């Protein structure tokens, strides 16, 4: 038998095997193909091998070498087909169940949670709702009427200095310019403009001042503003509400102190300090709503009086959790945030 004839025979088996293994779709046809090509007795490769004896002696080494190469190819094609079918199988629920090891430690899911300031806001809302205050909201971009004018802060007042505020257009200061609100007292005006007395609201939100950030300052922070207007409201009511609020939030051992102060929109005005853990800490300002403010929103100062207060939310949260640097809140380092 000529070498060429033998090799042609081998090539045919190799091509047929490649096509067959490539197209098998299940384990039965895979087994049938294995028997057809690689079967130890009747397999087609075996049949070709048997013809080796008829090849001219000189050509036999070349024939044998080629036979081994083709055998390797056919075996590889078989293994590939087996892996292909096997891979599909291990996706079935049964195969997955067999691999499930109940003794392995579980993979825990890391749950997110609310930012500590948001949590504080939620708590403050609950406490104040318990004291009969409802929640009001106002915009963070304000006009000068609500941030200053109606609050009895005239154009000449130093609080309106462009260096102390985030004006959105400095050119227009005093002519209806817009700015990021520097206090939540703006919402007092917005609410009183909209509804007649009695009013009993709180508003919690962001305010902006161009302060350099340090351990106790940040150019953006949160305030809780309260406003109560009715007939016969007195300073004693203000102090009672702030004391009840403080004991609810910080604990029964908190004391409260008023120090005389000045705000254009309250008269008289006070600074509010809380005594807690052997320290007096300033939490914000308060006072009786100035008659000029009541007039600006169309209320009659002869008929109604009111009190207002504005407290720093970061300070309350820091005090409660012993946080010493306000910047931690806004670094957004999850190692810090995850503690709350
Ligand atoms: N708006 C004042 C501030 O930002 C706080 C305040 C609110 C004072 C209400 C009196 C009454 O500091």
Image (spheres, rainbow, N blue to C red):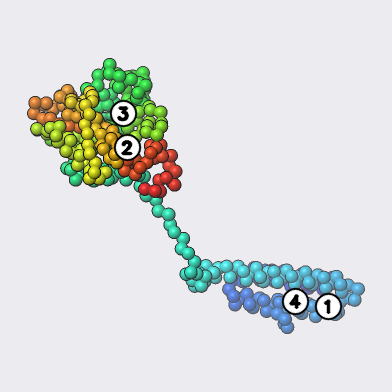
Q: What SS does tag 3 mark?
A: loop
Q: Mark 1 points at which residue?
A: 52
Q: Earlier in the sequence, mark 1 or mark 3?
A: 1
Report how far apart the C-alphas of labels 2 and 1 lie in the structure. Answer: 94 Å
Which residue is farthest front?
278
Q: Are marks 1 and 3 in contact (CB under 8 Å)?
A: no
Report how far apart the C-alphas of labels 4 and 1 lie in the structure. Answer: 11 Å
Mark 3 Cα shell of 10 Å, populated few (<14), some (14-19), many (≥20): many
Name the mark nearer the viewer: 2 or 1. Answer: 2
Residue at x 66% of width, y 70% of height: 79
Q: Residue 182 carries which label?
A: 3
Residue at x 76% of width, y 79% of height: 46
Residue 261 horizontal/vertical position (percent): 23, 25
Residue 300 horizontal/vertical position (percent): 11, 26
Q: Name the residue under label 4.
A: 45
Beta carbon at label 3 within 8 Å of ligand 1: yes
Report how far apart the C-alphas of labels 4 and 2 lie in the structure. Answer: 86 Å
């Amino acid at each position: 038998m000529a070498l060429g004839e033998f090799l042609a025979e081998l090539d045919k088996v190799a091509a047929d095997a490649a096509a067959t293994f490539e197209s098998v779709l299940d384990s039965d046809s895979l087994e049938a193909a294995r028997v057809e090509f690689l079967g130890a007795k009747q397999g087609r490769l075996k049949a070709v091998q048997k013809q080796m004896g008829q090849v001219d002696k000189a050509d036999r080494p070349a024939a044998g070498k080629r036979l081994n190469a083709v055998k390797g190819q056919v075996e590889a094609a078989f293994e590939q087909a087996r892996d292909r079918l096997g891979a599909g199988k291990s996706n079935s629920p049964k195969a997955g169940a067999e691999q499930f090891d109940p003794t392995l430690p579980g993979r825990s899911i890391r749950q997110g949670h609310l930012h500590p300031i948001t949590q504080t806001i939620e708590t403050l809302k609950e406490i104040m709702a318990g004291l009969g205050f409802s929640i009001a909201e106002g915009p963070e971009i304000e006009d000068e009427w609500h941030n200053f004018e109606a609050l009895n802060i005239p154009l000449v007042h130093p609080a309106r200095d462009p260096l102390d505020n985030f004006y959105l257009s400095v050119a227009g200061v005093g002519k209806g310019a817009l700015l990021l609100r520097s206090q939540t007292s703006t919402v007092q005006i917005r609410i009183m403009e909209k509804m007649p007395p009695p009013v009993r609201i709180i508003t919690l939100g962001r305010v902006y001042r161009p302060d350099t950030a340090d351990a106790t300052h940040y150019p953006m922070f949160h305030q809780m503003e309260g406003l109560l207007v009715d007939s016969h409201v007195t300073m004693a009511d203000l102090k009672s509400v702030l004391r009840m609020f403080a004991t609810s939030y910080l604990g029964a051992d908190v004391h409260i102190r008023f120090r005389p102060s000045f705000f254009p929109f309250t008269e008289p005005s006070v600074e509010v300090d809380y005594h807690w853990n052997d320290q007096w800490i300033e939490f914000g300002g308060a006072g009786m709503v100035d008659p000029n403010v009541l007039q600006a929103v169309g209320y009659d100062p002869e008929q109604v009086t009111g009190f207002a207060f504005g407290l720093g939310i970061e300070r309350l949260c820091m005090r409660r959790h012993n946080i010493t640097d306000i910047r931690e809140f806004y670094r957004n380092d999850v190692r810090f945030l995850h503690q709350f």
